Image (spheres, rainbow, N blue to C red):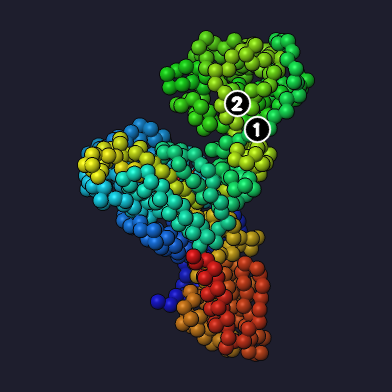
Amino acid sequence: MPVALKMSSVYAPTLKEDPSEAEVASHRLLLRAGMIRKVAAGIYTFLPLAWRSIRKIEQIVREEMDAIGSQEMLMPIVQPAELWEQSGRWELYGPELARLKDRAGRDFCLGPTHEEIITDAVRGEVRSYRDLPLSLYQINMKFRDEARPRFGLLRGREFIMKDAYSFHADETSLQEHYDDMAQAYGRICDRLGLAWRPVVAESGQIGGKVTTEFMALAESGEAALVYCDCGYAANVEAAETVVPRTPSVTEPRAIERVHTPDIRTIAELATFLAIAEHDTVKTMAGKTPEGRLVFLCVPGDRELNPIKAEWAVPGLELLDEEDFESFGIPKGSLGPVAPPAGTLVVADVSLKRDVSWGIGANENDYHFIGAMPARDFAVELWADLVLAQPGDGCPTCGGTLKGTRGIEVSQVFQLGTRYSETMGATFADEAGVEQPFQMGCYGVGVTRSLAAVIEQYSDENGIAWPVSVAPLEVAVLPLTVGDEMVAPVTERIWRACATAGIEVVIDDRDERAGVKFADADLIGWPYQILVGNKGVAEGTVEVKTRGTGERTSVAIVDAARHVAALVGAERARLTR
Ligand code: ATP
Ligand code: MG
């Protein structure tokens, strides 16, 4: 079916001014181009042009899933609490899980992800190793009551995700499908035209260990990444790091207790003690699930990575105000010297060789300088605790890490038996023994991908879509309204484009050329055919490429063919 639309009947209420609530390009431009409207915080209506683009993204995702043998299905958004109780996540999932009751008072939630439902759909039905592996996916709305919905479609509360789940008899089979998924995810990013990078990631709420995130590179991205020329790349949340340290003091000195009134920050402390910031040591406090106090020491000029701290001390929770009171410790002046009895002292490995720590004295307004491990205090556990940053050493090759930012558009996980065990989903193996499924789960943020594309494909005038995601590929703009020559030429080119299999819109509105130019660039039609009376008199039109701004004069008779060739080349480049 040829797609030939008229701008006069396309519902795309464009805005002249930048909406004040939008902080990032994609949010601003989706609103301005009349593609989305906000309904509530993090909840949007997708207007026709956005929906066209979303369907294209979905189709790309669908083709790539089908190509690796995953089967499409659809699961409910409203999910009964019982299933979440079986997996244990009714308790574990925080306030992001939107819970509700039906009229009979039964508990439900709005699905933020579908591990429980899919595990339930498969258990008891898939009984033998002969039926494995099995891979299923859906494209559906998700709801997460995000603490800070923002940046438009980048972090919504209601958003579209493609989520796939796979079931395997053993880890080898899981690894194979995981690799296929990762390949497919790379192809999806390529077909969307994204500049992207796979990174080592943290597995978060979902559980499991082996995981990769696919990051669309963008300054506006919420994820800080580090990468190395050797190919190592990680979300700083998960990045191992080699902290380069050259302590200024290399000889042990006597420990000295110093009165440090009104010192609040590490910078103030360093100035006061006349030592470098990196010679100070910060101590953060947490507690184990059993309630044991934990001190976490990191170099004063570095940040603790709470995720790594939890890797070092499973179940660790950082203290809140109340905890500080009940442990009776001073928040601003903690240190490993003479901590409360029973404290577990953990320190970042980079501090191991430091012989002179400037550190809190566990008493308000007092610090120690010259504190030396082993001599003055004991460290029970040395661990990698620090948030990685550019300039650190690469954990794989020892090179220097660089920094960039990214938008997580998708992620693949190996769940192992996290859900099959808790939910009793088993199959009979070759020996007839019941085994829990090895599972994987794989998510693509469809609406987030749309926004990520705009973050990479936009300029001060608007969006500059890659052909694969553009709501339509070509626009024909008659620049003089009511001109006897221009109108029929524009119409003819419009029809010829449709016949050539291009998605085309004609801007038939009774508007000035300036308005049409501005809207065409704002909405971002990849190719624009500009039809003016002067050109028509000479038998030519101009073809403009939105991305580069390049304009070429083309004979009227060749216009559709010319544009079809351009579109065709882009389609081919963006296909696998
Ligand atoms: P984030 O760390 O950004 O909160 P996540 O890791 O919790 O995301 P996943 O559970 O991995 O998200 O979900 C799979 C995909 O769904 C993500 O890679 C992302 O593209 C998309 N997604 C997740 N949360 C949102 C959201 N609030 N708004 C839009 N898309 C989202
Ligand atoms: Mg994720």
Percent position (x, y) of residue 542?
63, 80
Question: Which residue shows up at 43% across the image and 44% down it?
Answer: 413
In x, y percent, where is residue 105? 25, 37
Q: Which residue is mark 1?
A: 243
Q: Image height check: is 50 above or below 387?
A: below
Residue beneath the point at 48% across and 59% down: 188
Q: Who's the residue at 64% across and 72% down the image? A: 514
Relative to residue 15, is residue 151 depicted above or below?
above
Q: Is residue 260 visible?
A: no
Q: Amino acid at mark 1?
A: Val
Which residue is more in the foreground, 357 or 541? 357
- Residue 165 lies left or right of residue 353; in this view the side is left
Q: Secondary structure at mark 2?
A: strand
In the displayed structure, 392 sits above or below 63; it is above
Asked whether the residues under the numbered discs 2 and 1 touch, taking CB atoms below 8 Å apart as contact, a structural biologist would say yes
Residue 273: x percent and y percent? 75, 18
Q: Residues within 10 Å of mark 1 (few under 14, many from 20)?
A: many
The residue at which mark 2 appears reads as 348
Is 43 left or right of 434, judged from the image as shown?
Answer: right
Q: Is mark 1 within 8 Å of ligand 1?
A: no
Location of residue 261 in the rendering, given as x and y in whole percent from the top left corner: 71, 14
Which is more toward the observer, 348 or 94?
Answer: 348
